[in-house]
């Protein structure tokens, strides 16, 4: 979504950059303790280097936002020109060892995708696990099954093996857990047909479109939303990249491929030699190779598929470690700093992506700097307080205002710092090792069906250590200070308090929250009717939400009542397709209007498939798509303290009852 920026706001943006550059020059020229102990000097250089890189990445975002505003256009999904031939497309679902029940949802959804000529949609499951149950699933849904044995090239090898047997001009790819909506093809393929028409009209002056990346969207709350009780206030952590940063990349015709729910021009993949097999993030590298070959790429803003994201600390850390190592590997393979085939914009995007994975090392440096001074009197910045206030404060606060103004509503900068702090202790070592050439070659599929154990609680230890050290530093540094001493030390205290808040959130994230619901609820309004028990009378209802285990509904006629525990039968409708079911009332909510929570049991396979499509055809509207800025981090912190105190109270009460 394009955002207009007025001329006076652009002036503020440029002023923020100018003041920040002035501050950085002052930092480099006048504040480095060149004559200090070697450790102090090294850390001081690391700190100033981190500040320079952090500011440069902020400048890139601001400049890209200004460029986006100058183009002043919105990414509109074109319509199919039905006077032109409709292209055939191969749809590949890639699976390794994931749960077949999870795979079923994705396969089922692909069979419901709309297309002007559906016989031209060829669906295949690429299973390098050679599993009979997956082959049986393919037979059940009348889709192709491609298997292989002794795959040594991970996901990329599986895809390349499957593609060697396919020949449609377009190619779509899905991970096992990424469920497409019925409008997926209608929201992606028309970009290609429009591009082809433009190239014919201008005698191939328009660059060919290589791929369209649709957003990575998730139908369950992520680890930050769930463990921080923020499902109603905070967007999914990955939305910021998928629906904002990558869309900005796409405005510059160089969107990044993120591994799933994308559509490719088959010729572009063939031209670059298929999916690269010498990296564990073949998606990132393939997308760049396609751009280098002269093809454009774009990213759309509206989710047209949805998957499941891990909610355990171990799973999330392993996932991000693989992404971090893979991007570093691919950047080395692509020679992003000196490759002459990269355009300037593409090089900036890739370098910015590379530097992102060093964010977590920089975050640890930022945490350590005030700790060194407060606890050990190690001074890594030589600066007079008042000079610092004059040179640092205006640029710092104006830049952060501009970043807040230039950011989308998906995530604010403050929340981003919390997420960076969470990943920092576990990612800085893998990033460093990969950078110096110590590679991790083994591909690990992120586990979605999580079983928690005591070991998961050990992930809290680095946060607990840093949190304790920061609390001690705040007390020690400010103890006994009065008047001007407090003012002069306010910068150190400011940073200590900021890090203390961030680390407090990290503690709460790493404290596992119990999961009681077996399946996710989706807000869906679908019509249906119930056969009133003991009568031949049908009563109409509308669903409020649905899940794989049941749904809730309201009767059209509010005078009708059913007691809790009442078994009954009924029919739900998905686009006029009847779904016959039996059920039982498990909860009656006596409000206005009265509504019922019920179980669901469906016998017929066709009805089961339609019910799965009713659930998954559309994003989960019960989860926010933007951050509620009325809820501040302090509000969130206060809420989490209260919720955990209540949990402790319940645990103690239960323990006392058992021992009384």
Image (cartoon, rainbow, N blue to C red):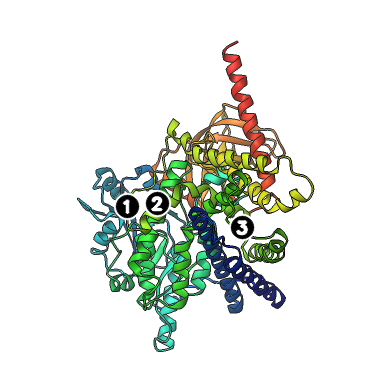
> Quick one: SS at disc 3?
helix
Image x and y of residue 158, in percent? 27, 56
Report the side of 350 relative to 377 (left or right).
Answer: left
Q: Is residue 556 visible?
A: no
Q: Which residue is mark 1?
A: 440
Question: For the residues carrying marks 2 and 3, which lies nearer the camera in this image?
Answer: 2
Mark 1 residue crowding within 10 angstroms, few (<14) / some (14–19) / many (20+): some
Quadrant holding the N terminus: bottom right
Seen at 49% across and 73% down, the residue is: 79
- The reply to whether dot 2 and dot 3 touch (C-beta < 8 Å) is no
Quadrant holding the C terminus: top right
Image x and y of residue 465, in percent? 53, 39
Q: Which residue is mark 3?
A: 413
Seen at 36% across and 63% down, the residue is: 330
Mark 2–mark 1 Cα distance, whole angstroms, equals: 9 Å
The image quarter in which residue 173 lies: bottom left
Q: Earlier in the sequence, mark 3 or mark 1?
A: 3
Mark 2–mark 3 Cα distance, whole angstroms, equals: 25 Å
Q: Earlier in the sequence, mark 2 or mark 1?
A: 2
Seen at 72% across and 39% down, the residue is: 592
Residue toward you, 5 or 342 = 342
- The reply to whether dot 2 and dot 1 touch (C-beta < 8 Å) is yes
Q: Earlier in the sequence, mark 2 or mark 3?
A: 3
Mark 3 residue crowding within 10 angstroms, few (<14) / some (14–19) / many (20+): few
Q: Residue furthest front?
A: 35
The image quarter in which residue 393 lies: bottom right
Question: Vertically, is 594 above or below 341?
Answer: above
Q: Which residue is mark 2?
A: 430
Image x and y of residue 625, in percent? 59, 55
> Quick one: SS at disc 2?
helix
Mark 2 residue crowding within 10 angstroms, few (<14) / some (14–19) / many (20+): some
């Amino acid at each position: 979504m394009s955002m207009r920026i007025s001329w006076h706001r652009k002036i503020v943006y440029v002023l923020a950059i100018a003041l920040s550059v002035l501050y950085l020059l002052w930092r480099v020229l006048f504040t480095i303790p060149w004559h200090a102990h070697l450790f102090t000097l090294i850390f001081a250089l690391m700190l100033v280097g981190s500040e320079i890189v952090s500011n440069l990445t902020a400048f890139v975002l601001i400049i890209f936002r200004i460029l986006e505003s100058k183009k002043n256009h919105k990414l509109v999904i074109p319509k199919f020109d039905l006077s032109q031939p409709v292209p055939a497309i191969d749809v590949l679902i890639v699976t390794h060892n994931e749960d077949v029940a999870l795979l079923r949802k994705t396969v089922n959804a692909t069979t419901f995708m709309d297309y002007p000529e559906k016989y031209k949609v060829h669906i295949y499951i690429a299973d390098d696990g050679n599993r009979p149950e997956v082959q049986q699933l393919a037979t059940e849904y009348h889709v192709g099954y491609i298997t292989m044995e002794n795959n040594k090239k991970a996901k990329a090898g599986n895809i390349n093996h499957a593609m060697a047997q396919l020949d449609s001009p377009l190619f779509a790819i899905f991970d096992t857990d990424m469920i497409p909506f019925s409008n997926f093809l209608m929201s992606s393929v028309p970009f290609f047909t429009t591009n082809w028409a433009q190239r014919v009209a201008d005698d191939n002056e328009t660059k060919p479109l290589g791929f369209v990346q649709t957003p990575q969207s998730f139908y369950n709350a992520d680890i930050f939303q769930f463990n921080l009780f923020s499902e109603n206030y905070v967007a999914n952590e990955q939305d910021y990249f998928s629906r904002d940063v990558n869309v900005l990349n796409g405005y510059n015709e160089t969107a990044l491929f993120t591994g799933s729910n994308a559509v490719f021009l088959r010729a572009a993949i063939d031209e670059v030699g298929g999916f690269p097999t010498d990296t564990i993030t073949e998606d990132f590298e393939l997308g760049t190779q396609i751009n280098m070959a002269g093809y454009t790429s774009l990213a759309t803003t509206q989710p047209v598929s949805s998957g499941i994201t891990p909610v355990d600390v171990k799973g999330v850390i392993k996932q991000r470690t693989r992404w971090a190592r893979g991007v570093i590997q691919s950047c080395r393979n692509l020679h992003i700093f000196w490759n002459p085939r990269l355009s300037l914009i593409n090089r900036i995007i890739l370098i910015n992506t590379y530097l992102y994975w060093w964010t977590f090392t920089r975050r640890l440096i930022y945490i350590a700097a005030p700790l060194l001074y407060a606890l050990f009197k190690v001074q890594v910045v030589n600066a007079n307080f008042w000079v610092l206030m004059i040179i640092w404060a205006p640029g710092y606060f104006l830049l952060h205002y501009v970043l807040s103004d230039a950011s989308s509503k998906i995530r604010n900068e403050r929340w981003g710092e919390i997420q960076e702090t969470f990943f920092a202790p576990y990612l800085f070592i893998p990033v460093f090792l990969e950078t110096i050439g110590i590679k991790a070659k083994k591909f690990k599929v992120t586990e979605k069906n999580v079983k928690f154990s005591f070991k998961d609680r050990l992930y809290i230890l680095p946060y607990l250590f840093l949190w304790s050290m920061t609390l001690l530093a705040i007390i020690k540094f400010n103890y006994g200070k009065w008047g001007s001493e407090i003012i002069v030390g306010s910068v150190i205290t400011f940073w200590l308090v900021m890090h203390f808040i961030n680390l407090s959130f990290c503690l709460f994230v790493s404290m596992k929250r119990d999961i009681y619901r077996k399946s996710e609820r989706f807000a869906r309004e679908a019509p249906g009717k119930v056969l009133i028990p003991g009568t031949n009378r049908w009563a109409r209802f509308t669903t409020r939400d649905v899940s794989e285990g049941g749904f809730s509904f309201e009767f059209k006629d509010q005078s009708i009542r059913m007691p809790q525990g009442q078994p009954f039968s009924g029919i739900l409708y998905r686009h006029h397709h009847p779904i016959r079911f039996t059920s039982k009332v498990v909860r009656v909510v006596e409000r206005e209007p009265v509504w019922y929570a019920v179980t669901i049991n469906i016998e017929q396979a066709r009805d089961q498939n339609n019910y799965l499509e009713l659930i998954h055809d559309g994003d989960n509207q019960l989860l926010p798509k933007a951050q509620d800025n009325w809820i501040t981090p302090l509000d969130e912190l206060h809420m989490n303290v209260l919720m955990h105190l209540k949990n402790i109270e319940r645990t103690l009460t239960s323990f006392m009852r058992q021992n009384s």
